[in-house]
Amino acid sequence: MELIYTAAQAQFRTEVRDWLNANIPTSPLPSFDTEEGFAAHREWEKTLSEGDYGMVTWPQEYGGRACDLIEWLIFEEEYYRAGAPLRVNQNGIFLLGPTLMEYGTEAQKQRFISAMASGAEMWAQGWSEPGAGSDMAAIRCRADRDGDEFVINGQKIWSTRAVFADWVFCLLRTDPESSRHHGLSFILVSLDAPGVTVRPIPQLNGLPGFAEIFFDDVRVSDFNLIGEEGGGWAIAMATAGFERGLMLRSPARFQQASRRLVELYRQRQNDILDLSIEDSVVRCYMDAEAYALSTYQTASRLINNGAIGPESSCNKIFWSELDLRIHETAMSLLGAKAEIEPGSPDADQQLANWLDGFLFAQSGPIYAGTNEIQRNIIAERMLGMPRR
Amino acid sequence: MNFTFSDDQLLFRDTVRDLLSNEVTAERIRQRWDSDSGVDSAALQAMVDLGLTAALVPEEQGGLGLSAVDFILIAEECGRAALPEPIVDSCLVATPMLVDADRALEGSNSRLRELLEAVASGEQTVLCGPSINPYINFAHSADYLLLPHGNEVHLVATDAVQLELQTSVDLSRRLSKVSWQPRSETCIARGEIGADLWRSTLNRGALANAAQLLGLSEAMVARSVKFATDREQFGRPIGVNQAVKHLLADCAVKAEFAKPAIYRAAYTVAVAPTRADWSVSHAKASAGDAARAASRNCTQVHGAMGYTWECDLHIWMKRAWTLDREWGDAGFHKNRIHEWLLQPKALLGPQYTFGRRHMGDAANPITAV
């Protein structure tokens, strides 16, 4: 155990910090759930990619820097410290990217990864269906093989950012006779393909962050099939592992939010506050730190040829509940002003950030597998409790 | 940057775990409750033979020269076993205090050196009675006590003090209130040196309890998983019910995120024990939280059995209750963090997970403040 950065790691931090200071947008970008904001965030992805910071952990041939996970953490720490824009293509770079690295053919990697890293192609996720939410194995949306193509019919829902995205990675039923998690395939579909209809679903903030996607005889080349036909479930589970495991929510995000919370608290510490505030502020800071330490531990273990164990299913519950607590505490500290929407005479950037974060925090315990499902996974796979 | 334990450290942990699971059964813990000393001499000797008492003694005094990082997993195992003997208090807290005192005095006190040798070999035991703890656990079984008088550190023979025994709700514990008169010949350190020794000792004590609380939490959850798997109602194990699963999953999440805080605190204590307040308080507060949750939820999972004397769960639960309050309770430790968060010079934010220093600095390896 050696909890000191090496000279090379310190040097990398300085490089990242200098580059970000020179390149981040001077004023905050509009929400990426608006057309204008999406375009601005796409432009930022391009800038990142030109600096070779699009996805630092990827091999150099795909636009990365072949960083190890400690360097990834350093990059993320500097990224959030600098207040750089959120990653609009996170479905692509954090979920599909690692999946392609592991399960894609060389040709598929060449075709999709660089375009993803540069922001040229933005990705949405097409897993949930009206009848297949927490019970994802109930998927019905079909992809019937026709020569070297698939013909897709059916519906997906809750596809984040699909309104403006270019592509969607889907889990589809390729064997019509199959049931549950058999006979599903992992297929990439262009949202511009004939027969695709994307219908926006406004989220809690009124913006079209979600979409329903309808497929009506959509034809897709079987080049877009990832892994074996009928082997999609295992790939989706691996993708979900990336999502719930390490990369989806880097700890720096919550450390930065709790640092801002402490600053807000310092401004109001002499006022009359809810009696639980002191405790909440302390817990938020401790828990953000604990999540960071835990991630350093996992990163170190993976670098030393260890594996992510079933205990990683604790992550998603921990950070999503932490995010809620940070923002609930901030709302409490902001008092009557907490409800003021951006654009109002009394609004300011600080209020806008907290309100936006508070609304988004409501979704944390739901997406990427509800926290109730996560608790079942912990109980059964980590603790070994009986399924039935 | 490497936040893992070495193979040697893990092997040491496994060896101790095996020993404790054989030597410290619930039945033998209950036998201790009926004994005068509360000590199982055979189990204690086995731990001495494994080198636990020598672990943190420097090699020059016949010890193994290990650090708090080497011992932290051992402390966790002692908690998992609900070990009654104060091995963690003596090996991870009192012994390093003697070592620090010896270093601060540059070896000028030959009594300290001799005592360290006797401690390493298991011939003599020393325990600490810091002002934050009104009682000393197993004081009657120690040969010497380290006692505070202001900033002064006194090394006092136990037969020279008066002990008033108190019965703990946890019958494995043997508490004493100590009455004594400070004398110049018992004082081994004072002033700044004494203050630093007590400050380090408070951090080591809280760290020691944090690690034991983690082991206790995991042990309670493991017992409850087994109970929920074996116990059937409505024709199936009660553990298939989500309400039961979620009680234990919540405990697992708390324990899982107390772990890295405890290990970071162990590292910080090993390199700079006087500057480990923040990391130790984080460790103690989160481990206490995990242990309180495990105590409550595991009792609930056991149903009426969990409220009986016969069910072994209370061996672990009562230890968790008591260790949570010893060496500073949640209020003490959260207040230390709160105070720190309000300091204008506090280093907050994602770039400071490991403190100010971003580079290796062998001469002054302070990594967390």
Image (tube, helix red, strand yellow):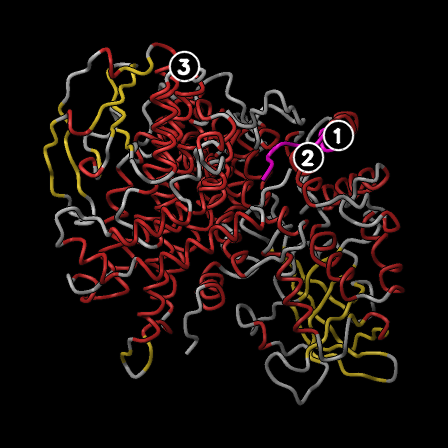
Along the line of sight, the residue nearer the viewer: A197 or B320: B320
Q: Is residue A53 left or right of residue B282?
A: right
Q: Which residue is mark 2?
A: A79
Placement of the N terminus of chain B among the 4 image quadrants: top right
Q: Position of residue B319 (x, y in %)?
A: 25, 48
Q: Which residue is mark 1?
A: A20
Q: Amino acid at mark 3?
A: Ser
Q: Position of residue A234 (x, y in %)?
A: 66, 72
Disc number for residue B245: none
Identify the residue shown where x is 45% and y is 61%.
A375
Q: Secondary structure at mark 1?
A: helix
Q: Secondary structure at mark 2?
A: helix
Identify the residue shown where x is 52% and y is 28%.
B271
Considering only vertical position in the picture, is B348 above or below B173?
Answer: above
Res. A25 visible in picture: no
Asked if marks 2 and 3 touch (Cβ < 8 Å), the reply is no
Q: Which residue is mark 3?
A: B108
Considering only vertical position in the picture, is A11 above or below A302?
Answer: above
Considering only vertical position in the picture, is A190 above or below A44?
Answer: below
Q: Is residue A224 left or right of residue A355?
A: right
How far separated are the C-alphas under marks 2 and 3? 52 Å
Q: Amino acid at mark 1?
A: Leu
Q: Identify the magenta region.
A: A1-11
How far separated are the C-alphas under marks 2 and 1? 7 Å
Q: Position of residue B163 (x, y in %)?
A: 12, 31
Mark toward the viewer: 3 or 1: 3
Asked if marks 2 and 1 touch (Cβ < 8 Å), the reply is yes
How far separated are the C-alphas under marks 3 and 1? 55 Å
Badge 3: residue crowd in 10 Å (few <14, some 14–19, many ≥20) = few
